[in-house]
Amino acid sequence: MLFASSNLGKILEVKNILGIDIKSLKDLDRNINIQETGNTFLENAILKAKKIYNETKIPTLADDSGLVIPSLKGFPGILTHRHLEGSDSNRNQEILKRMKDKEDRTCYFVCAIAFFDGINLITSENKLKGLVAKSEKINQGFGFDSIFLYKNRYLSDMTINEKNEISPRKFALLSLKNDKNFQKVIDFKN
C-alpha cells in the first residue's frame, strides 16, 4: 500500500498502527502535485487518495489534517498552508495574534483518512479537542503542538508516546483498520 505523504514521522506512525508495509511517494521516486480543492479535510484526503491511485495504480491511503478554531470561524482549518506561511512558529504567532481578545479558546485538531484501491473508497475521521494557549511554548513536537493545550498541558511538553495515546490520526487509523471492508482488501500481518 502507498501512503500519500513524504513525512517520515507520519509514515512510521501509519506502519505501526496498521501493522502493514507502507510505501511513500519517495520510495517510488515520484512527485505528484495534488490540488487540495475540497471544502473539508475528508474531501481533501479523498482527492489525494484517488489522484495518487490513478497515477500509480497502487492502493493508496491519504490523510488531511489541521487545526480548527471555532471562535475564528474554523480558521485556519483546511486553509492552513495556503494562508499561514513561514515556519511553525510564524503560523503559531499569527494564530495567537488573532486569538488575543477571544474568550472562547476551544480548538480541534482534525485528522481525516481516505483509502482508495480503484474500487473501494473507505474513510475515517477523528478529532482532538483542546484549547489555544495564550502563549507559545516551544519544546518538542511540530506544527501547532506549541500552542495546543490538552487538559491544561501543551502538546509540545508531551513525549511521543503520550501524544500518540491521544492522536486523532491514531484513532482515525484504528477505525479504518477495524472497518470490515478495509479488512477484506488489506492483508494484515497480525
Image (cartoon, rainbow, N blue to C red):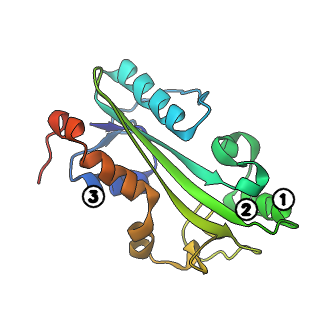
At x 28%, y 57%, the residue is 17
Under tag 1, what secondary structure?
helix
- Residue situated furthest left in the rendering: 190
**Which one is earlier in the sequence, the residue at label 1 or at label 2?**
2
Residue 59 pos. (x, y %): 28, 30
Residue lying furthest right: 101
Give, as a three-letter code, the residue at label 3: Asn
The span from disc 1 to disc 2 (Cα, nearest Å) is: 10 Å
* Foreground: disc 3 or disc 1: 1
Q: What residue type is labelled 2?
A: Asn
Question: In the rendered view, would you say 22 is above or below 156?
Answer: above
Horizontally, residue 7 falls left or right of residue 77, namely left
Q: Where is residue 4 in the image (x, y as percent from the top left)?
A: 42, 37
Q: Which amino acid does label 1 sit on?
A: Arg
Residue 68: image x %, image y %?
65, 53
Disc 1 marks which residue? 98
Q: What element carries label 2?
A: helix
Of badges 1 and 2, the one in the foreground is 1
Task: Read off the residue under disc 2.
Answer: 92
Q: Residue at x 76, y 75 (%)?
A: 135
Residue toward you, 27 or 146: 146
Is 21 left, or right, of 95 in this rendering?
A: left
Image quadrant containing the C terminus: bottom left
Q: Mark 3 points at which residue?
A: 16
Q: In which quarter of the image is the N terminus?
A: top left
Which is nearer the N-term, disc 3 or disc 1? 3
